[in-house]
Amino acid sequence: MRNSICFSVKNLCLSVILLPMALAAQDPHFSQYYHSPLTLNPGLVAQKSDMQLILNYRNQWASLSQPFSTPQASLLYPLLKNDGTRYGGLGLSFINDKLGQGGMLQTTGVAGAFAYNFSLESGHYLSMGMQGGYYQKKLAIGELTSGSQWQNGGYNPQASLGEDFTQTTVTLPDMSAGILWYLEEQEKSIKAYAGISLFHLNQPNESFYGQDYQLPMRISYFGGVKLISYNQFDIIPNMLYMFQRKAQELSLGSLIRYN
């Protein structure tokens, strides 16, 4: 299960996922994906005029003895002209994704993003972002077991795994890009937004066997609109659809915000 509540100086955000449908996506992501801009769309780093510090934590399938555990920290910094007009933004994110007892498979990385805003008309903006990252995947062989260790009807932890690992650490330079359209109201709040992003454009090799196994590109479509605004409460339905090779996910939900 993945949970988060976002607090900021100006508002309180509570997210409700109404309909998740997933088929084992390969990249770590969060239920409240719009609070993780550098894993959703690099264009989002230019959407707000306030500096933001965002902390996320995922604890997925906690009922299992070896769940996913993923902390993430992101910093967004707006780029403003002398008159206060926002023309772009910078983003920096750190993430650590662990699977299994003792971090059997661990991915650690840092990503930086830049986005530029194009003002269209009547509060409409188009933000185009680029992102570069550097990640390290580490495999703890001592925490692994395999069928080759079952011998003569019993388990032998000293037996070979029967796997031909040529390395236990893989480094991955990564490139991503995204485009975001959004409609900003007079009080600078977001009325509606939609975007598309492409992650792993360079499709880096992530094999532990010394073979050529490229990390597949992930394509995401997302959007939302403020439908109800009453007594300082906003209700913003949203959706996310993404696919990566044969894995895909559709999430429909709503953001309830108190201003």
Image (spheres, rainbow, N blue to C red):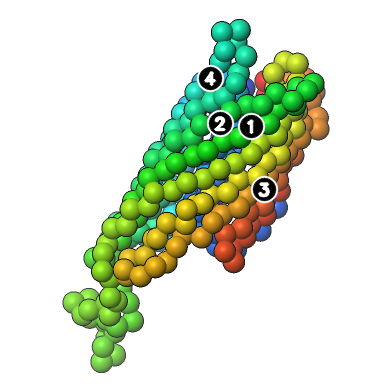
- Label 4 SS: strand
Q: What residue does disc 1 label? A: 127
Q: Quadrant of residue 33?
A: top right
Marker disc for residue 71 = none
Marker disc for residue 79 = 4
Inter-mark Cα distance, 2 to 3: 18 Å
- Label 2 SS: strand
The answer to whether mark 2 and mark 1 are in CB contact below 8 A is yes
Inter-mark Cα distance, 4 to 1: 13 Å
Q: Quadrant of residue 231?
A: top right
Q: What residue does disc 3 label? A: 221
Q: Looking at the figure, which quarter contains the C terminus?
A: top right
Residue type beneath disc 2: Ala
The disc, 2 or 4, on the residue closer to the chain's N-terminal end is 4
Mark in the foreground, 3 or 1 = 1
Residue at 26%, 64% in the rendered image: 167
Q: Give the image location of residue 58, x and y in percent.
A: 48, 46
- Between residue 106 and residue 85, name the one nearer to us: 85
Res 52 visible: no
Inter-mark Cα distance, 2 to 4: 9 Å
Residue type beneath disc 4: Leu
Q: What residue does disc 2 label? A: 115
The disc, 2 or 3, on the residue closer to the chain's N-terminal end is 2
Residue type beneath disc 1: Ser
